[in-house]
Amino acid sequence: MLVMESKGEMQHLEFDIPSRGLIGLRSQMLTGTAGEAVMAHRFAEYKPWKGPIPGRSNGVLISKFGGVTTAYSIDKLQDRGTFFIDPRDEVYAGQIIAEHIKPGDLNVNAVEEKKLTNHRASGSDDSVRITPKTQLTLEECMEYIQQDECIEVTPKNIRMRKTLLNEDDRKKAGKAMESAAVV
């Protein structure tokens, strides 16, 4: 912090922050100040690397299979996270479909269809209630992703995915990273 002074009812703060530390700061500032913050920045100089900047603490839900998502499967998974997809969206294996409520990633099946039987409970088929998806902008995706994730931008969609789409490849890479850290 370089400057901290009062200007009427407002506080004026000046910081020296690395440019990579600004990614995601604007949305956090607006949320923390209920939209009252005014932010401006400019490049000052190149400096040596100061160390890692902490990322998100929660994991993600990753699609285990490709296909079209169903309301039935999303309804069953809603208590595990906040979704970035809606029912009937096309997904592929390795795509990030939700933020997990706990640390650590979880592979889930969002394309599972309801098993059809002759037995029906009255009203149970209409009880699916799905919360609306969280729509992230490109900048929000950039602040959200971790080291092993990337953003896929197409004319119709902005999606996040794991760099390694195959679940087994991700496990092998994770074990390789653990063994390299031990040595």
Image (cartoon, rainbow, N blue to C red):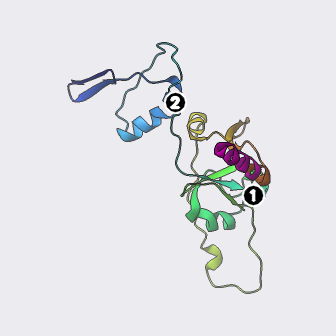
* Residue 130 visible from this viewpoint: no
Q: Amino acid at mark 2?
A: Gly
Image quadrant for the C terminus? top right
Q: Residues within 10 Å of mark 2 (few under 14, many from 20)?
A: few
Along the horizontal axis of the image, is 134 left or right of 179? Answer: left
Q: Residues within 10 Å of mark 1 (few under 14, many from 20)?
A: many
* Residue 44 visible from this viewpoint: yes
Judged by depth in the image, the label closer to the viewer, 2 or 1, is: 2
Give residue 63's position: percent from left, percent from top. 72, 55
Residue at 62% x, 64% y is: 77
Q: Could you say which is closer to the camera, residue 180 or residue 22?
A: 180
* Residue 64 numbered tag: 1
Which residue ends up furthest to the left in the rendered image?
8
- For the residue labelled by badge 1, is the local secondary structure a helix, a strand or a loop? loop
Q: Amino acid at mark 1?
A: Lys
Q: Is residue 76 above or below residue 47?
A: below
Give residue 27's position: percent from left, percent from top. 46, 36
Which residue ends up furthest to the top in the rendered image?
45
Give residue 181's position: percent from left, percent from top. 65, 43
Q: Is residue 86 above or below residue 143?
A: below
Image quadrant for the N terminus? top left
Q: Which segment is the magenta one? A: 171-183
* Residue 51 numbered tag: 2
The CA span between labels 2 and 1 is: 34 Å
Give residue 144's position: percent from left, percent from top. 57, 41
